[in-house]
Image (cartoon, rainbow, N blue to C red):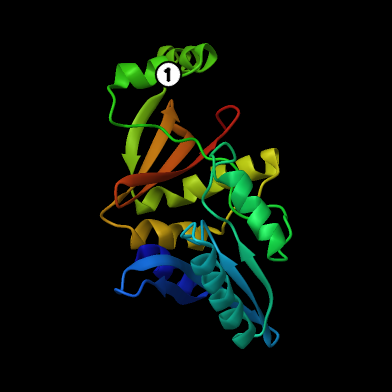
Amino acid sequence: GPGAALKADFGWERRLVAVRAGDGRLIAGAQLLLRRRFGLSIAYVPRGPLFADDPIADRLLLAGMIRLSRRARAVVLRIEPNLNEDQPQADARHSWALLQGMQPVDTIQPRSSIHVDLNRSEAEILAACSKGHRADIRRAERQGVQIQVGSEADLPAFDAIMQATAARAQFAVHSADYYRAAFNLHQPRARLLLALIDGATVAAHMVLLMRNKAYTCTAAQLKPA
């Protein structure tokens, strides 16, 4: 898929690990990414692996990931299961990982995500926002903020605002080439939305649609340049 192709373009190798039942059904799996440097590598499973919640299958999956990592001379295997901390299985999964000899570390992916159900009307989505956020939206409308769909030609503006946002909020971002590749690889299911005041871009929002979910990356200036 586009995600795997994107990682491959930026130095990652992909390996798939699967655990199947006797009838051939896939019951657990992982997309293992490897990045090599100086004869060694790191192994990373973003937003995964997909566990089976079956002790035997999960141990087989972990053993397979470790075996592949060692073959690639990886110095570390890092996993980031796609679980919310308030989900019932989160504590059990955390305890299981500790028992397998794994240690908790800071995440590479953003630790928290905001999920917005789009199977609702615009009025319902707005009503679900906090009072302060609703006030911000209305203030932007009063101040003449306009939204338009951008193109690849607008990616430099997106990158400039992203870099400024990252410096201000102290978080890491990808390079301009990475975002350009992501935008192009996901076409025609990618959009760049721009917020403008008096013709100046003050915020940018990249949306990548994968299956039935849209993943977004947003940057905004504190005030127009």
Q: What residue type is labelled 1?
A: Ala
Q: Name the residue under label 1.
A: 128
Q: Is residue 123 left or right of residue 171?
A: left
| Residue 11 seen in the current view | no
* Residue 11 image position (x, y, % from top left): 54, 75
Residue at position x 49%, y 35% in the image? 114
Pick the quarter of the image with the N terminus. bottom left
Give above or below for 170 relative to 186: above
| Residue 26 seen in the current view | yes
Residue at position x 29%, y 73% in the image? 23
Q: Choose between 98 and 137: the one closer to the eye.
A: 98
The kind of secondary structure element at disc 1 is helix
Q: Choose between 162 and 18: the one closer to the eye.
A: 18
Examine the image and state in which quarter residue 216 appears.
top left
Q: Choose between 122 and 32: the one closer to the eye.
A: 32
Give above or below for 98 relative to 143: below
Pick the quarter of the image with the C terminus. top right
Q: Is residue 205 left or right of residue 11?
A: left
